[in-house]
Image: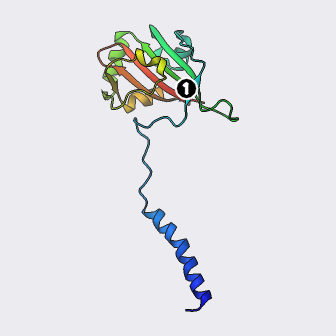
């Protein structure tokens, strides 16, 4: 085989091998309840208890009796450009509201612990229930939420991001 012909064969093979390998690669895993956040949560560290910022964003929390929550932005505030905001909250609701959620959603024991900021961890119930359809109910108007109900409590845990 002549040198130009060998070069053409080598070039063709070098282009074909990555394409062939890419076609054989396993698909990327799809997001799930256990997917870790992609960016670090930052914020003032102020623990809040006011209800209006939560109840105005989430009508399902309109009857909230109390809340402990923190908020901030994802990523590094020194980097320019749009950023996502986050809210982590532990909310106490009337027993009737919790009972209604338990009957509406396909709850099961949570496979993962909520990825809340450290200051909120002591507020988490020991045992949690979760459901994709409950997440979807709180994931409207630009919010992407993970929601957990305390098993045997009147507590709801909300982990949400939004623009």
> Horizontal and vertical percent for residue 135?
42, 29
Classify mark 1: helix, strand or loop. strand
> Horizontal and vertical percent for residue 95?
34, 10
The quarter of the rendered structure image containing the C terminus is: top right
Q: How many marks?
A: 1
- Seen at 36% across and 21% down, the residue is 149
> Horizontal and vertical percent for residue 121?
43, 19
The answer to whether one can see residue 161 in this image is yes
Residue nearer the viewer, 62 or 47: 47
The answer to whether one can see residue 141 in this image is no
Furthest residue in direction front, as rendered: 3
Q: Quadrant of residue 104?
A: top left
> Horizontal and vertical percent for residue 72?
59, 23
Q: Is residue 112 above or below residue 90?
A: below
Residue nearer the viewer, 65 or 110: 110
Q: Which residue is mark 1?
A: 86
């Amino acid at each position: 085989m002549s040198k130009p012909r060998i070069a053409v064969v080598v070039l063709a093979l070098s282009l074909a091998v990555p394409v062939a390998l890419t076609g054989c690669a396993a698909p990327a895993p799809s997001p799930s309840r256990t997917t870790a956040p992609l960016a670090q949560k930052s914020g003032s560290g102020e623990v809040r208890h006011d209800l209006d910022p939560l109840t105005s964003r989430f009508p399902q929390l309109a009857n909230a009796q109390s809340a402990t929550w923190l908020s901030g932005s994802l990523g590094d505030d020194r980097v320019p450009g749009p950023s996502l905001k986050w809210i982590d909250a532990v909310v106490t609701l009337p027993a009737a509201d919790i009972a209604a959620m338990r009957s509406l959603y396909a709850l099961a024991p949570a496979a993962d612990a909520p990825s809340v900021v450290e200051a909120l961890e002591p507020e988490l119930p020991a045992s949690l229930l979760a459901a994709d359809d409950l997440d979807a109910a709180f994931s409207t108007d630009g919010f992407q939420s993970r929601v957990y109900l305390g098993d045997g409590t009147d507590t709801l845990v909300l982990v949400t991001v939004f623009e």
